Amino acid sequence: MLSRRERERYKRQILLFGEEGQEKLKEAEIFIAGAGGLGSPISIYLAVAGVGTLTVVDSDVVDQTNLNRQILHYDSDIGKKKTVSAGEKLREINPDVTIRAIDAHIDEENAENLVGRADGIVDAMDNYPTRYLLNRIALGKMIPLFHGAIRGLYGQATTIIPGETPCLSCIFPKPPPAEVFPVVGVTPGLIAMVQATEVLKFLLGTGNLLTNRLFLWDGMQAQASEICVERNPCCEVCGDGRKSEPVRRKR
């Protein structure tokens, strides 16, 4: 049940979702991998929307070079653990949600336990090995993976539903070269909003998800486009040899 305080806080979105929808958000738990350029706006907007529990995992400390895009962190946070900085801000932004900020490097040994009983995984990472790991965890737990990636003024996003859509390895069989890439804060801001919107739609069981489609943003030309993506039946991660059941969307 929503408290009187929550009814007032979420009054304008209850007009859209109803109290039942807001209660679904309150009961949900989302795992956010990364508290950087993508993870900052994603966690902010899911927190203010009233998603009940947010688990934010990162292992880095705030660096001055982060501040052009990682909007959870301020100049005074330089040298502080990102999870400490993120937890402080998110709890102040909305004290009615539970923030689990975990200082850890996501790897094969801890990923499954870190994700726990989350209803979905948000990919806010900057490297493909971890993304592929999260993809496998999402498939194993039969929960969605909300993918986003950026470079400079370009970005992409898609929603992966185990048993229904291609997985990340289907879409990107080989990772791009590992490198330090350019980034300006507006790009992760925009892609993060797409990802956060997908999370809310999934939890509410409304709208058309960005499934079987890869959203592409060209900030240089101010153009958005999409390409259809298909599941690879021979995929080593989600191919026909792997048994799975479709994810049940929240209704």
Image (cartoon, grey):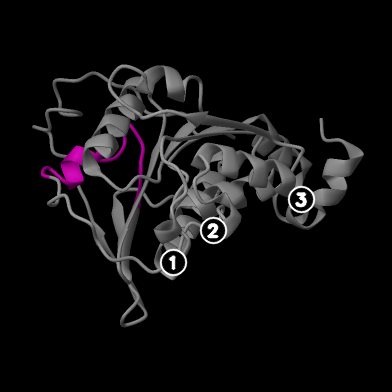
Is residue 130 shown to the viewer in this render?
A: yes
Residue tagged by mark 2?
Answer: 71
Contact between labelled residues 1 and 2, with CB atoms less than 8 Å apart: yes
Q: Give me the residue at 65% from left, 38% from top.
A: 25
Q: Give me the residue at 40% from left, 60% from top.
A: 65
Q: First in sequence: mark 2 or mark 1?
A: 2
Tell me where residue 227 appears, x and y as whole percent: 24, 61
Residue 200 is covered by the magenta coloring: no
Give the class, few, some or many, for how many residues have Cα within 10 Å of label 3's Cα (few <14, many ≥20). some
Quarter holding the N terminus is top right
Classify residue 106 by image quadrant.
Answer: top left
Residue tagged by mark 1?
Answer: 185
Label ID, residue 14: 3
> 224 above or below 103?
below
Is residue 216 shown to the viewer in this render?
A: no
Q: Nearer the viewer, residue 207 or 181?
A: 181
> 230 above or below 217?
above
Amino acid type of disc 3? Ile
